[in-house]
Image: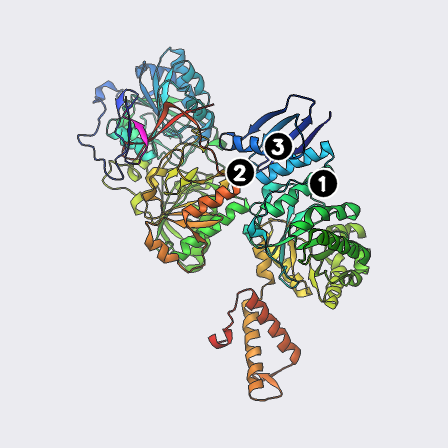
Amino acid sequence: MKQVVTGNAGPKIRSDIEVTLEITDSGGIELDLKSRVISMYGGAIDKQCRELLEFFGITHARLTINDSGALPFVIAARLEAAARALTGSAASFLPDMIPENIYPSSRDRFRFSRLYLPGNSPGMFLNAGLHSPDGIILDLEDSVAPDRKDEARILVRNALRAVNFYGAERMVRINQGQRGLEDLEYVIPHNVHLILIPKCEDADTVRAIDRRIKEIKTEAGQDDEVYLMPIIESAAGVENAFGIATACPSVVAMAIGLEDYTADLGVQRTKEGSESLYARNRLVVAAKAAGIQPIDSVFSDVADMDGLLENVMSSKAMGFEGMGCIHPRQIAVIRQGFSPAAEEMEKAKRIVLAYRDALKKGLGVVALGSKMIDPPVVARAEKTIKLALRLGLLTEDWAEAGA
Amino acid sequence: MKLVENAAGRIVPDEINGREAVPFKGIGKHRPEGRKYAPPVPTCIDYPEDNNKVIPSLREALERCGLRDGMTISTHHHLRDGDLVSNQIFSIASEMGVKDLVWLPSASFPCNNPVIEYLENGTINRIEGSMNGPLGMFVSEGKMKGTAVLRSHGGRVQAIQDGEVKIDIAVLAAPAADAFGNAKGTGGPSATGVLGYAKADYLYADKVIIVTDNLVDLPCFPMEIEGNYVDYVVVVDKIGIPEKIVSGTTQITRSPDRLLIAELTASFLEKSGLLHNGATMQAGAGGTSLAIAVFVHEMLKKKGWKLSFGFGGSTKYMVSMLEEGQMGYILDAQAFDLDSVKSIENNPNHIPYPVFNAYNYHSKGNLTTMMDIMILGATEIDTGFNGNVVTHSDGLLLHGIGGWQNCLHARNVIIPLPLFRDRIPVIVDRVTTLCGPGELIDAVITERGIAINPRRQDLLDAVKGKGLPLVTIEELKEMAERICGRPEKAAFDDKVVAAIKWVDGTVIDAVRKVKR
């Protein structure tokens, strides 16, 4: 019988577990448990392992556990991945869905910051939501090694049920092609809000994914909307941007991935970004024309917070409405950047008040001091006020509270 | 020996290493009487007229001090993990065939693990001081002959002053010393900045040996150790490994989760009003504490406030507050990095201040009760706000007390820590080992909420409605157990392997041998 190893162990690994499973002919379950928390959870781990093996109908096996303080949902995922690999079973041993994870998303919620979490690194999941990103992305694509993709799916599925993400929009980035369609089966039934489609080049891909999601939802008897965010990462994708943005009503946002895009062009990615200016402009225009949110690429230097803020300000100026994050410390900077600045809010307040005043007095023209104010300026000011209200920067009674 | 229940509900021995021990009676309840201990009277005619006390080797110095079985040898820990002196004492004693020594370090470090050999061969009977890593494990497994005694930095001074511990020979490493024995922490290749833990040792030991790698002309000034108390001066090539004595630079944590806790702590200090112009503050050198110092520094600058003084261990983050005008003085018992060492040498407002004067139960007042903000750590806090700093939840003795117990006497004790480490809950129903009573711990700040001690209604009122994530300590415990599962308690044998002393010398808890 062959042996299967799943999970991770090593001096730098925390909150994970390495499982070595070998099915034997006789002798029952031989469990060799090594754990940093053995005196506190040795009994619980032993019990959990035996329960899971029984679930998969394994009665004789040699199981070696090297545990670095993994939580139960991780232990279950690692062992399930090993059991599936050996038995060919497609059964799922699901941890309980915690009630905190049942909440809806909405089409037009903010997507300023979305935090990428490598799908096979459980230690990074636990506190991700505490950093208050607008969304968390459990990534099954580029951050997972090719030979770990099967176990990552199970881990991500379990995380969607057992880890509290504290109100963040629950997103998963699936793989490309057929594997991506299969990924959906693992995640859709577990209250995923949004699927990111990597390296998207045409509307058909989006529609195929949307169809598959609807099939899974019908099977599972779910009726919550699952939104889509295609990521444009190639020249072909840029050319087809509007078609992708309007591929189906589930698409709520469209992002650009500049590492792959610049690679596709055969150019270097620079900080000032002149090589991607056209693509970014095109994406913004296509998204706005389609009535969805344009989302910018990640900023990869996690130590350079000033550079990040500069980057956010230029993104915002171009019309983007959000950015990806690869480190929790980027979240606050991105949020601050996309929020209306104090003087921007003050100006908007004055314009809206002047507009309301003019309406009351039955005046056809709105003036602020000696300056005439055109309707689009009023519309933009109202948008700013709306944004500030939603972000809690202003209270509903701001007009009475005094501008 | 019998086991008795102390005032904190812990079962402790009434006798330790053949000596009567007083069980903990409650905070501020124990008041010993009598006179302070005094070492034998020396006479100057027994010392060279030219006052040159330099002798060729540590072995000769120990021999001349009359090193023999059962003696108590003290050292201080300012060479930290770069200490090249302490282990030598016991290697020499072992060669001399001396047995049953008591080692009284102010702290031990991983570099002291080789003394396990001398614990095993009978040279050392026991350690009365902190034990980390393998040394702690050795004790926890019941392998040490005597019973370990863990004291706070202040408790060590108390025990020396009231005669609970009598030091026969103090071996004090010094980065600079003259031939008379005056010594200080600055200068030379092994600078430690200050020698904040050596004062009780040189005042109360029968014999004092200074070991230095930097013999300077008399007077070695400003002297932290006065030559009038010193018997011998030994000059060696190297007393320590510089990069392990002070870190080149202390670094704030890079962990986003710990930064989150630090930010929340700083926000708590601001919203509670604990941080104000003229406040006093002490924070440690851990990554989270350093981050708190950085956030506090930013707040002070924004508000134009100045802390009146800070108590060290000092770091470059405190030094920058001092230099940029957000802190009036640093009073300092230890310097953690090179910037601090330089600051002590050059800045008259950065003042060496021994724990003898800051933390001592037999002192006519202490610095700690004057501190407004005290940031401390813990391995466990329980739902009664009691704290543990010496054992992990698996029962293994892995840390010393340091100044932790002494610092609990500050006006506001704030403990920022993660709710769980890997799978190990930090907020528990009952601490494995009691090191500090819950009456003295005012707030626990975790990434998942802040619990304020219900005894501090004033603090609860001060932060009400200010947007902080307030929870009860029981809620924190529930959260931790929901995520990690309910842990089984560590299993112990009956054998007491270590006694935990309170700041007044009473026994607050005992550590037992772990069951394997």
Q: Which residues are magenta?
A: B8-14
| Secondary-structure class at tag 2 | loop
Residue A81 sits inside the magenta stretch: no
Disc 3 and disc 1: Cα gap in Å? Answer: 17 Å
Q: Which mark is residue A9?
A: 3
With respect to residue B96, does B307 lie above or below? below
Q: Position of residue B49 (x, y in %)?
A: 25, 21
Considering every residue shown, the one lying at the far top of the view is B97
Q: What chain is tagged by disc 2?
A: B
Disc 2 and disc 3: Cα gap in Å? Answer: 13 Å
| Residue at the (55%, 68%) spot, across then down | A389
> In the rendered structure, which amino acid carries the disc numbered 3?
Ala
Q: Position of residue B180 (x, y in %)?
A: 31, 26
Disc 2 and disc 1: Cα gap in Å? Answer: 24 Å
> In the rendered structure, which amino acid carries the disc numbered 2?
Asp
Judging depth in this view, the residue of A95 and A155 nearest the camera is A95
> In the rendered structure, which amino acid carries the disc numbered 1?
Lys
| Secondary-structure class at tag 3 | loop
Specify few, some or many for label 3: CA neighbours under 10 Å numbering under 14, 14-19, or 20 or more: some
With respect to residue A42, does B295 lie above or below? below
With respect to residue B385, does A274 lie above or below? below
Q: What chain is tagged by disc 1?
A: A
Please tell me which of labels 3 and 1 falls first in the chain.
3
Q: Position of residue B241 (x, y in %)?
A: 48, 28
Residue B11 sits inside the magenta stretch: yes
Q: Quadrant of residue A211?
A: bottom right
Q: Which mark is residue A149?
A: 1
Q: Mark 3 and mark 1, same subunit?
A: yes
Q: Which mark is residue B422?
A: 2
